[in-house]
Amino acid sequence: MDYERIEQRARTGERVRKIVTYTLLTLWALLVLFPFYWMVLSSIKSYSAYNAEYVPSFFTLHPTFQNYVDAFTAVPLAKYFTNTLIFTLATTAMMMVVIIFAAFAFARLNFRGRNLVFGLFLALMMIPNELVIITNFVTITDWGMRNTFWGLILPSVTSVFYIYLLKENFEQIPDELYKAAKVDGTSDLKYLFKVMLPICQPTIVTIVILKVIECWNSYVWPRLITDDQAYFLVSNGIQEIRENGFGRENVPAMMAAVVVISVPLIVLFLIFHKKIMAGVSRGGTKG
C-alpha cells in the first residue's frame, strides 16, 4: 500500500510539473508570437479602418488584401526581392567555398605558423564591426564598386566565426579516417568532399541557413554602399517604402510589405529547423 501511495504521489507530482511547464511554455509562445500576429492582422486592415480605431482591435471582421497589392505597386518590391535573392545566393555560395577550404587547411594541413595564423584570425573577431565597415566602405569606394553587386557581396564572403565552427567540426573526425584514406591514395581534396563534408553535413546546413538569414536581413552595409534603387535590397526597400512609397502614416500597407519580406525566412526556418538544431547540438562525428 505504501509503495502504491508513493508511486501515485510521484505520478501526480510529475503531472503537475508537466502542467506548469507546458502552461509557462504556452504563455511564452503567445508572448513571442504576438508581434507576428499583430503584424499580419494590421496588414489585412484597411487604411480607414485602422485609423478609425481609437482602441486597437485584436481582430477584424472585414479583412482586405489590397495592402499586399499596394506593396508591389507603390514601389518596385519585386525588384528588391530579386536583388536580395541574387545577393543572398551569391554571397552564401562564395562564403561557403572560402570557409570550407580555410577550415580544412587549419584542421588537416600541417604548415609552419598554422596556429599563429589561426590565432590572428580569431583576433579579428575582437575588432568592432564599425571599424570594419569604415575600412570596407573606403576600399569599395576607392575600387569604384559603389552601387554594384560586387560592392555588396565582397565584404561578406568570409566569416572568422564560421571558419572556427567548421574547423572544430573537422577536427573531431578521427585521424584514422584520414590516414586510411591516404593509404588508399585518396587526395586531400577528394577526402574533403567524400568524407569530411558528408560527416559534417548538419553543421554545413546550419551555416548556410544562418548566412542566408544574415544576408536577407542585412541593412547597414547595403544602405551605406548603395543609393541607387536598382541595387536596393528588401531591407533598404522598407525604408524606401516608408519615405517615398506609402508614407509614414499608412501603417497597414507597411505591415503588408513587412509580411511579404518575412515570409521566405519563416518558411526557410520551418523547413530546416531540425537541421539547424542538429547542427548546433551535434559534433562533427556521427554516433
Image (tube, rainbow, N blue to C red):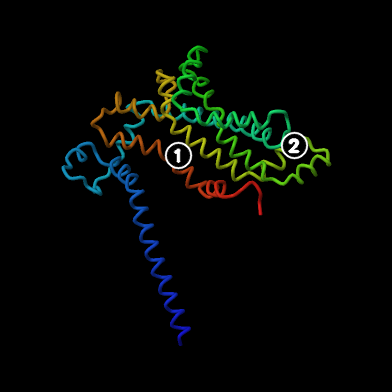
Q: Which residue is tagged 2?
A: 190
Q: Can you give x and y, in whole percent of width and height, for residue 39 in the image?
A: 32, 42
| CB-based contact (under 8 Å), mark 1 and mark 2 | no
For the residue carrying disc 2, how many other residues have a C-alpha within 10 Å: few (<14), some (14-19), or many (20+)? few
Gap in Å between the C-alphas at discs 1 and 2?
Answer: 35 Å
Can you say which quadrant of the picture contains the C terminus? bottom right
Disc 1, SS: helix
Q: Can you give x and y, in whole percent of width and height, for residue 187 in the image?
A: 78, 35
The quarter of the picture where residue 260 lies is top left
The mark closer to the camera, 1 or 2, is 2
Vertical placement of 231 versus 32: above or below? above
Q: Can you give x and y, in whole percent of width and height, for residue 158 in the image?
A: 56, 29
- Left/right of residue 204 with respect to residue 189 in the rendered view: left
Q: Nearer the viewer, residue 140 or 265?
A: 140
Q: Which residue is tagged 1?
A: 264
Residue at 21% in and 40% down: 50
- Left/right of residue 210 with respect to residue 247 in the rendered view: right
Q: Can you give x and y, in whole percent of width and height, for residue 243 in the image?
A: 29, 25
